[in-house]
Amino acid sequence: MKAPTIPLLSICQLAVALLSAVMLVGLPASTFAQTVESELTAGTIQVGQAVELRIITKGKSQGQLLDQVEVDGLQVAGSQQQFQMQMALPKFGIEVATVQTVILVPTRTGEFTIPSLRVRLDGKVYKTTESVLRVTPATGGRMPVLPAIPVPQTGTMTPPVTTQPPQPSQPTPPPAENPEKSYFGEMVIPKETAFVGEVVPVDLRFNIDANFPSQFGDRPNFSGEGFTILRTSRPSEVARDVNGFDYACIVFRTAITAAKAGTLEIPPASVSARVQVPVQAPRSDDLFGGLLRNFGMTDLREIEIPTESATLDVKPLPREGRPDDFDGAVGEFKIEASATPAKAGPGEPITLRVVVSGRGNFEAMGPPAIANAEGWKVYDPSENFEPSPTDPVGFNGTKTYEFTLVARDDQTATPPVQFSFFDPAKEEYVTIEGPPVRVQAAGAGTSQPDASATQPQQTASAPTPAPQGNDLSRDYAATNFQPLGWASFFVIAGTTLTVVWTLGLAVLLARRYAGSPAAERGRKRKEQRKSIKTLDDDSLSDLDFLNGCHLILNQHEQISPELSSEVDHIRSLHEKANFSTQTLQGLGPEVRRQIIQTLEKAHDQQRRNL
């Protein structure tokens, strides 16, 4: 009897399983936090279409759903549980992610509330959040109920998807005579009509005979005209039974958004695969054909698995009832607003944080509108999008906008925020509002520096005492007739006193001038000229350059009318650089040179006026 052989791949799988068991038993538990989440794959469907309710848990063990979904008007068509283990280095912790999927099919129209369900995880019982499903009348054929597809876990490495043949102990269908007919692709779109800008989920499913070991590419080939494609999820695998035959189904999730109205032709998608198929020997050669079949000889082939094409009826967004602030948002959203800090002084900014969450075309929509913003200076917002952790495509999540506000007058609350979008389920425009947030903001007052200098106190100088001469000599014995004032003693003394008096007067006048307004203005002119020269430095950042310009302009007591518009432009650039959350654009060498020339003109005019 021929000794059985164990494939190398099976040995590797056995080693991984043993390693996982050792890790679960002998190593410390992970510090992963337990999380329980639930989500519907669609918020609005038609009667007869299938929707998946996913309960996703993460912990040290598998999660277990304790309740049944019982909602009048919703039929449970099936359920499935998948789990995945993740090892975290260097602590060698183990996290188990469990995806429990319940397939629901509505039997009538209406709005259905799926209650919270109990889930046991790591010895504790948690409850999921309620979900709301809106069901509209059917416009086409009934959607088939398809097997549940597990959601790949965010942040984990997913190797190329490889299918394995069933074990010999299980009954398997005979291999197909023509391997090229043992695979097929499907493009599943949950609706037949959509609006321009609406995000429509798409499942690309590629099936191959489970008897043929195969390896799929990590990305499908999918493109077309007239629509944009959101990012594609990592592939996930599920086993399917089609007409009594076992198939390995590889699923890629994505979504499309139509750019124009009309009939949208969606071309087929495809994925490459490497398949091991049995060697087919000629039927006339029984000897060699039997030997090849008995020894299990296979041939590795490169194939391309295509899906069928699809069409989508795209309707334009209605003009009737369109709000003035509508900026292209299509979906279902809600809004929240907050502000920090709660108290601000004159000229100090306040950050208004607006969070838009829900389901829709986040990539194409614009920011909310600030309503009744009188008394505030509002700057362009920054934006950041965070997709839902359970959404591998990215049309569920939250988008955060941060506005910078500066109060012109004293304010007790921020202005309200409005956000308008088109709801494709209701087929109408909806405007939601974020109410004002209580703050205390003082108005931005303008203060001019006091240019007058403190006058020094006048100090009276003592008069120079008259020189005291010596008493006349009573010796009348004259030696010559030269006047006494011409004597060398009197000449030296008089000259010394004159020089000392002159120097003292000069020092006194210099001190008086140094403290005078004219001297102060002269020093300011020199400092301004020096400051203007320091701005002509390419190494300065745009923010430092504009701050320097702002300081120089604040030292000018008045600006001539012909330069007022240019100076206002410089002040506007300074405010935008300091308060706006967007990066300043267009401040190149030429713009800097023009600003420096404006400062020099203002400096020369001030010098002439003085």
Image (cartoon, rainbow, N blue to C red):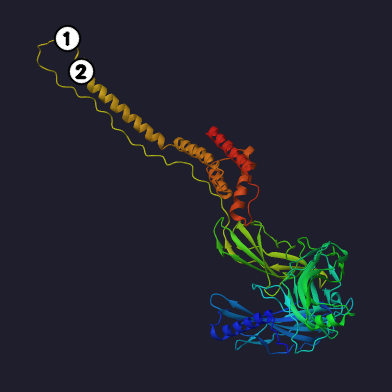
Relative image position of residue 394 (x, y in whole percent): 72, 69
* Element class at badge 2: helix
Relative image position of residue 253 (x, y in whole percent): 76, 72
User: In the current view of this chain or complex, which residue is farthest to the top?
Assistant: 481
The answer to whether mark 2 and mark 1 are in CB contact below 8 A is: no
Residue occupying the point 90% across, 80% down: 284
Q: Quadrant of residue 177?
A: bottom right
Which residue does the numbered mark 2 point to in the structure image? 488
Q: Quadrant of residue 4?
A: bottom right
Indicate whether 406 appears above or below 178.
above
Q: Amino acid at mark 1?
A: Phe
Return the mark for residue 393: none
| Precedes in sequence: disc 2 or disc 1 | 1
Relative image position of residue 168 (x, y in whole percent): 75, 87
As rendered, which of 148 and 90 lies closer to the eye?
Answer: 90
Residue occupying the point 66% across, 81% down: 13
Return the mark for residue 481: 1
Relative image position of residue 382 (x, y in whole percent): 65, 60
Q: Quadrant of residue 410?
A: bottom right
Indicate whether 234 appears above or below 487.
below
Can residue 19 be seen here? The reply is yes
Quarter that holds the N terminus = bottom right
Can residue 148 be seen here? The reply is no
Indicate whether 594 appears above or below 188.
above
What distance separates the C-alpha of mark 2 from that of mark 1? 15 Å
Q: Nearer the viewer, mark 2 or mark 1?
A: 2
Q: Amino acid at mark 2?
A: Ser
Q: How many marks?
A: 2
As rendered, which of 281 and 96 lies closer to the eye?
Answer: 281
